[in-house]
């Protein structure tokens, strides 16, 4: 290693980072300048990628946790040839490929969207699990490293507890995390809020912990070599770095380690930008250059990588020739091809909870989908994901032959790990818990929606009918919250979350089919704790009729020239069918519509929606959640009855009576609404 060249390369990254933020008039230069030494060593000496195939399945991955340090990432990726100087100059501008916080783009070397601290390194845990899963099944040629970069802020986030515990428990020796310990955060120095011994903490979680000078490329390379030699534990490299390394004032005085350089351009921090760039060996008049010795360093690395990848590709080719069936299976995994599953043939007992019907489907998926990982936050026997567990087995320390992750009581960690599994590629990820605890998961669900990751969420115990557990466990506003993400469109114009609340076992089965076929967005399955009646078919085939739910909503009880249309989803649909029978006895014609996906239904052509909910006919909606959940479906002239209060502790049938969710109580509301 040539120390002079390595220092020049790190300083090159610092100059680019400072210049990007300065030109954009916003951003975070200090941390990017402090972490430059590590990313330079990593990318110029250790990270294995294919320069000619950026999405090669066996590449090493780098997950950035502090997304505000994007100038550092874009800077080093400019050295690798992934970004041009012109693109760096468009940092934080409309339509640029260098947004303020990185947005997933593997073709450019950006493995994850990052910004909300703590999630980036937790996604790295997920990717490391995916690597162990695939290497266990396809051999050593598949092995690769997952690197994570975490800051003082990210390590303080509560999610780091779950990520550290799970990675250490599983013995993810392929995971190497660099802790950029510069002792400064956004508004204070770290010692104003934290005196934790992180080395001891991670050792207690069974991590291999190394401390080194994070400004010394030789020390960093030595730490990485030790991490590569570790065979049983994940490694944490605590690099003691310097916020705003290289910063000086107008008179040349040292301005390193200052909190003010964290979250604003250097010109506003007290540092002098031109003097700082000069101090780092750059030209203040034209900082947008890659120095000749740095070009040579990274060109040499590209040549090394092509040789490394060629050898690895030969290993893969030999393996594929010796294992043609496994090679075809891996190709299917990577291309997202699913095995044939006859969902119609899945058998359910009569009148079961939709979580039970979901379990019947998960049993079949566990048998046939060989690249699927399912997790539960200590509720596998309640959310019924244990059906998948029974078919596949659980992960254990050093053993990834199973396909089920016991996440423990860590909903946010679990959801973020699923994002990492999905980001890795070649994998399908699903996780379950009680619907009320989707509150804990929301930040990771939002990132999944933003990244367009097809993670599946199994949320059971969907309403106040949880019963005796009381209001802490009874979701009310939660469906409305998730429907907001259904309303929000992603960057490709699709609804960012597919939300499905099935009414019976037929709908629950098709909901799973829709979830598995959905490769563009996450999917939420909202399922009952309590048994629900199977809906009576209009014709002879209930399953065939339920397939219409792929349009978001459909008629489950038809009426000629209806006087009122009753609309709901989930367990309220069978209740509305009972109400329709009572109305019919009083001479009122009622049509019943199930709308498991409001978003899909609203996206249908007007004539289809009007065939379900005719114009000029009164529309009454019923929901166990907030009334706002169904307002867009029933329209301005419609009425929705829902729950606008927290639940209560009592048997669910008592709550049905107290809250007005009995056929008789709803009947009176409908009659009052239509004036009968």
Image (cartoon, rainbow, N blue to C red):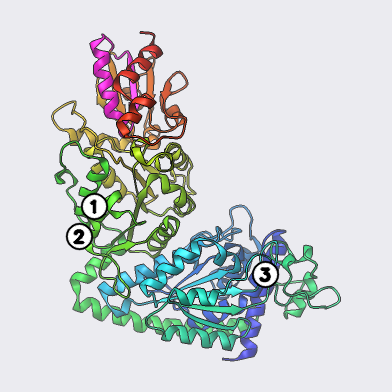
- Crowd around label 2: few <14 · some 14–19 · many ≥20 (10 Å): some
Gap in angstroms between the C-alphas marked 2 and 3: 49 Å
Q: Which residue is drawn at 33% across and 79% down?
A: 313
Is 290 displayed left or right of 397 in the figure? right
- Secondary structure of the residue carrying tag 2 is helix
Residue beneath label 2, please?
391
- The image quadrant where one finds the C terminus is top left
- Secondary structure of the residue carrying tag 1 is helix
Give residue 191's mark: 3
- Tell me residue 670's x, y (percent): 36, 16
Which sits earlier in the primary sequence, circle 2 or circle 3?
3
Depth order, front residue of 438/131: 438
- The image quadrant where one finds the N terminus is bottom right
CB under 8 Å between callouts 1 and 2?
A: yes
Gap in angstroms between the C-alphas marked 3 and 1: 48 Å
**Quarter residue 423 falls in:** bottom left
Q: What stretch is highlighted in magenta?
A: 562-588
CB under 8 Å between callouts 3 and 1?
A: no
Residue beneath label 1, please?
362
Which sits earlier in the primary sequence, circle 1 or circle 2?
1
Depth order, front residue of 439/342: 439
Q: Is residue 566 magenta?
A: yes
């Amino acid at each position: 290693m040539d120390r002079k060249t390595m220092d020049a390369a790190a300083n090159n990254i610092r100059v680019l980072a400072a210049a990007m933020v300065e030109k954009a008039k916003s951003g975070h230069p200090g941390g990017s300048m402090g972490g430059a030494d590590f990313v330079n060593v990593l990318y110029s000496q250790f990270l294995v990628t294919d320069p000619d195939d950026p999405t090669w399945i066996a590449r090493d991955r780098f997950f950035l946790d502090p997304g505000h340090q994007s100038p550092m990432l874009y800077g080093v990726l400019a050295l690798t040839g992934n970004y041009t100087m012109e693109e760096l100059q468009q940092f934080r501008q409309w339509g640029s490929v260098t947004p303020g916080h990185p947005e997933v783009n593997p073709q450019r070397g950006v493995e994850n969207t990052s910004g909300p601290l703590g999630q980036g390194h937790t996604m790295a845990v997920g990717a490391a699990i995916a690597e162990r899963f695939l290497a266990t099944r396809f051999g050593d040629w598949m092995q690769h490293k997952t690197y994570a970069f975490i800051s003082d802020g990210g390590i303080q986030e509560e999610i780091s507890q779950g990520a550290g515990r799970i990675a250490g428990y599983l013995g993810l020796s392929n995971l190497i995390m660099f802790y950029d310990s510069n002792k400064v955060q956004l508004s204070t120095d770290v010692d104003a809020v934290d005196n934790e011994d992180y080395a001891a903490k991670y050792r207690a979680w069974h991590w291999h912990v190394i401390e080194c000078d994070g400004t010394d490329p030789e020390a960093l390379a030595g730490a990485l070599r030790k991490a590569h030699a570790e065979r049983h534990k994940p490694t944490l490299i605590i690099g003691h770095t310097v916020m705003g390394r290289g910063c000086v004032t107008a008179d040349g005085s040292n301005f390193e380690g200052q909190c003010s350089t964290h979250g604003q351009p250097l010109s506003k921090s007290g540092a002098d930008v031109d003097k700082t760039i000069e101090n780092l060996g750059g030209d203040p008049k034209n900082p947008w250059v890659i120095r000749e010795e740095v070009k040579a360093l990274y060109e040499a690395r590209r040549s090394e990588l092509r040789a490394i990848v060629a050898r690895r590709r030969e290993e893969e080719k030999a393996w594929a020739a010796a294992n043609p069936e496994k090679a075809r299976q891996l190709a299917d995994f990577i291309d997202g091809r699913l095995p044939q599953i006859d969902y119609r043939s899945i058998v359910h007992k009569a009148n079961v909870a939709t979580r039970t019907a979901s379990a019947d489907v998960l049993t079949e998926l566990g048998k046939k989908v060989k690249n699927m990982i399912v997790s539960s936050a200590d509720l596998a026997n309640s959310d019924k994901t244990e059906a998948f567990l029974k078919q596949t087995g659980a992960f254990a320390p050093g053993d990834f032959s199973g396909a089920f992750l016991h996440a423990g009581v860590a909903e946010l960690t679990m959801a973020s790990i699923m994002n990492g599994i999905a980001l890795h590629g070649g994998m399908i990820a699903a996780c379950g818990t009680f619907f009320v605890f989707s509150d804990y998961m929301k930040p990771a669900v939002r990132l999944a929606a933003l990244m367009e990751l097809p993670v599946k969420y199994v949320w059971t115990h969907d309403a106040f009918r949880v019963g005796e557990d009381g209001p802490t466990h009874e979701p009310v506003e939660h469906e409305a919250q998730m429907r907001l993400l259904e309303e929000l469109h992603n960057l490709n114009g699709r609804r960012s979350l597919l939300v499905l609340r099935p009414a019976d076992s037929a709908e629950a089965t098709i909901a799973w089919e829709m979830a598995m076929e959905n490769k563009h967005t996450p999917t939420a399955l909202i399922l009952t704790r309590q048994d629900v009646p199977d809906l009576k078919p209009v014709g002879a085939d209930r399953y065939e009729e339920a397939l219409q739910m792929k349009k978001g909503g459909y008629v489950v009880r038809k009426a000629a020239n209806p006087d009122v249309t009753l609309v709901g989803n989930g367990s309220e649909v069978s209740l509305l069918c009972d109400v329709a029978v009572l109305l019919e006895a009083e001479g009122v014609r009622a049509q019943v519509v199930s709308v498991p996906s409001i978003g899909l239904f609203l996206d249908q052509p007007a004539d289809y929606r009007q065939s379900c909910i005719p114009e000029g006919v009164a529309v009454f909606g019923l929901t166990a959640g907030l009334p706002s959940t169904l307002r867009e479906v029933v329209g301005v002239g419609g009425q929705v009855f829902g729950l606008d209060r927290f639940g209560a502790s009592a048997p669910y049938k008592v709550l049905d009576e107290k809250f007005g969710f009995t056929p008789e109580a709803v009947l009176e509301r409908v009659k009052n609404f239509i004036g009968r």
